[in-house]
Image (tube, rainbow, N blue to C red):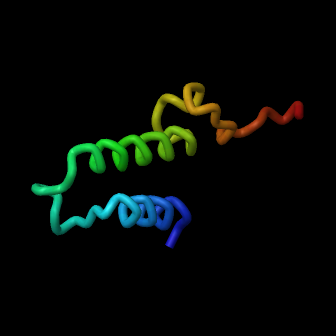
Amino acid sequence: MDDLALALAREARRLNLTALDLDTADPDALHRLAHVVLTELAARGLLPGEEEVGCHAAPRSGAH
């Protein structure tokens, strides 16, 4: 299992979220998990926004 999946599962457990209770889950907990997911995806360069999260995941140029 990759590190992103483990990190997201850890955060979901911390927020007491499971796939079984999505309809009754705390909206604030779902919002927090969505925030973590989007931040992690941006940090990996998979979504726009890496500038906002201060990520250096983009490859460096060969000049460095």
Residue furthest out toward the right? 64
Q: Residue at x 40, y 62 (%)?
A: 14
Image x and y of residue 46, in percent = 49, 41
Residue furthest out toward the top? 51
Q: Residue at x 30, y 50 (%)?
A: 29
The picture quadrant where one finds residue 15 is: bottom left
Q: Nearer the viewer, residue 47 or 25?
A: 25
Q: Is residue 37 above or below residue 42?
A: below
Q: Nearer the viewer, residue 50 or 33?
A: 33
The picture quadrant where one finds residue 16 is: bottom left
Q: Residue at x 12, y 56 (%)?
A: 24
Image x and y of residue 26, in percent = 21, 51
How many numbered tags mark residues here? 0
Image x and y of residue 5, in percent = 46, 64
Residue 43 appears left or right of 5: right
Residue furthest out toward the left? 23
